[in-house]
Image (cartoon, rainbow, N blue to C red):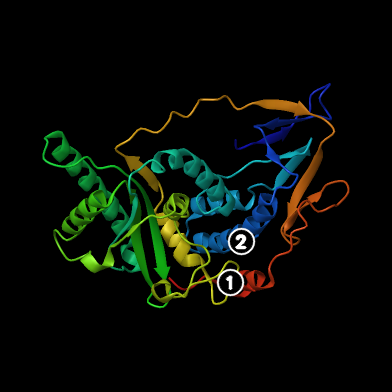
């Protein structure tokens, strides 16, 4: 449960803190270091995007970026757990990770029972920045038309029932300065995937050529969890190759040649604003219980504040570091010298 905190100042509770949710365990929890790493990356990105938004007069967007900069700034630790508040914005690496875990846990029990799941990637030809907003709207509308058309055919007994999970992403090619909106889709079988692919090509090419047959990709999923992670991993990649169409295979931790294209990411997040990136059709998910967010008053707690220069949360009394995180030297180099605010 995402948590929030505030200080209670009325009589009798002056030294207490009210914390919401169940908190996050601290002992033997590798995610704590991962969150410090994600916080460092996200802070560098949003500071760059704040400058870009202000330059373009998009002050409300800049406020949202600042909201992410302050995400998890304050921590309260008590009885082996820590509590904080989250921005829930899609450009926040930590909040995306929380959302990804939620979706994974919700969809995995369904997909694991599918007969022969396939991963389908549906894309259109690359576009320039000035066309991005309209094209994002167009691909979303196209897919809605395909969904409705397939459902009507099935209801009339003239077509199969379509079942799938989908997510919308967008890559940026800095070499060509183009964008590539695309869908990742998991279907229960190859037949459904080919059906959707056929409808996609037909719909996208109604008025002009936008989607070629060879540009669409279909593979059988051998590992359901990895396949689902591929679908829900991100809306736009923060650390990216200059040319994603010719990127090399990387081992974990290999960041050589990666850059952060902040202006391009700002364009992508703007174009995706108010759109749902994830969705499903053809089956019912288990109901999410409407649980009231619990809260409690705690004493004997420790308070921590995030210090951007140290890239860690510092104890307000002892000045002890919360995670002892040390940034990878090459990642630090990327965030300081490869943060591109011009290319789009």
- Residue 327, label in figure: none
Residue 98 left/right relative to 303: left
Pick whichever, 110 or 198, lies toward us: 110
Residue 294 to residue 169: above or below: above
Residue 56 in percent (x, y) is at: 46, 62
**Nearer the observer, disc 1 or disc 2?**
1
Residue 253 to residue 142: above or below: below
Within 10 Å of disc 2 (Cα), the crowding (few <14, some 14-19, many 20+) is: many
Q: Are marks 1 and 2 in contact (CB under 8 Å)?
A: no
Residue located farthest toward the right when viewing the structure as drawn: 318
Residue located farthest toward the top when viewing the structure as drawn: 12
Instruction: Please name the residue shown 43% across and 41% down the image.
Output: 107
Residue 53 in percent (x, y) is at: 50, 59
- SS state under label 1: loop
- SS state under label 2: helix
- In which image quadrant can residue 110 be found? top left
Residue 317 in percent (x, y) is at: 87, 46
Q: Which residue is mark 1?
A: 254
Residue 285 left/right relative to 71: left
Pick whichever, 294 or 111, lies toward us: 111
Residue 297 left/right relative to 281: right
Residue 263 left/right relative to 284: right
Q: Is residue 223 visible?
A: yes
Q: Which residue is mark 2?
A: 41
Instruction: Please name the residue shown 41% across and 53% down the image.
Output: 231
Cα separation, mark 1 vs mark 2, equals: 16 Å
- In which image quadrant can residue 12 be found? top right
Residue 344 in percent (x, y) is at: 43, 70
Q: Is residue 276 visible?
A: no
Instruction: Please name the residue shown 37% across and 53% down the image.
Output: 168
Which label's residue is closer to the chain start, 1 or 2?
2
């Amino acid at each position: 449960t995402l948590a929030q905190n505030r200080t209670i100042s009325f009589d009798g509770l002056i030294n207490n803190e009210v914390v919401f949710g169940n908190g996050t365990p601290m002992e033997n929890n590798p995610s704590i270091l991962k969150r410090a790493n994600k916080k460092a990356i996200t802070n560098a990105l949003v500071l760059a995007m704040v400058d870009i938004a202000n330059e373009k007069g998009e002050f409300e967007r800049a406020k949202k970026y600042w909201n992410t900069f302050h995400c998890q700034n304050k921590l309260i630790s008590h009885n082996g757990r820590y509590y904080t508040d989250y921005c829930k914005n899609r450009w926040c690496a930590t909040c995306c990770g929380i959302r990804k875990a939620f979706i994974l846990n919700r969809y995995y029990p369904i997909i694991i029972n599918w007969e022969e799941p396939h991963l389908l990637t549906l894309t259109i030809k690359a576009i320039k920045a000035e066309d991005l907003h309209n094209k994002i709207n167009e691909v979303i509308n196209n897919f809605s038309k395909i969904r409705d058309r397939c459902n009507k055919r099935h209801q009339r007994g003239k077509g199969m029932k379509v079942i799938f999970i989908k997510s919308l992403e967008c890559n940026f090619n800095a070499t060509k300065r183009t964008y590539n909106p695309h869908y990742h889709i998991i279907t229960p079988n190859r037949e459904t995937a080919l059906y959707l692919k056929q409808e996609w090509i037909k719909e996208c090419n109604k008025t002009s050529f936008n989607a070629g047959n060879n540009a669409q990709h279909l593979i059988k999923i051998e590992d359901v969890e990895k396949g689902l992670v591929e679908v829900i991993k991100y809306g736009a990649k923060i650390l990216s190759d200059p040319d994603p169409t010719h990127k090399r295979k990387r081992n974990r931790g290999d960041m050589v040649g990666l850059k952060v294209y902040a202006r391009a990411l700002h364009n992508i997040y703007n174009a995706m604003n108010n759109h749902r990136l994830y969705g499903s059709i053809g089956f019912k998910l288990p109901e999410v219980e409407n649980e009231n967010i619990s809260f409690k008053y705690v004493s004997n707690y420790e308070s921590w504040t995030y210090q951007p220069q140290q890239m860690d949360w510092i104890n307000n009394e002892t000045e002890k570091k919360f995670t002892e995180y040390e940034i990878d030297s090459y990642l630090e180099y990327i965030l300081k010298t490869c943060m591109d605010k011009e290319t789009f």
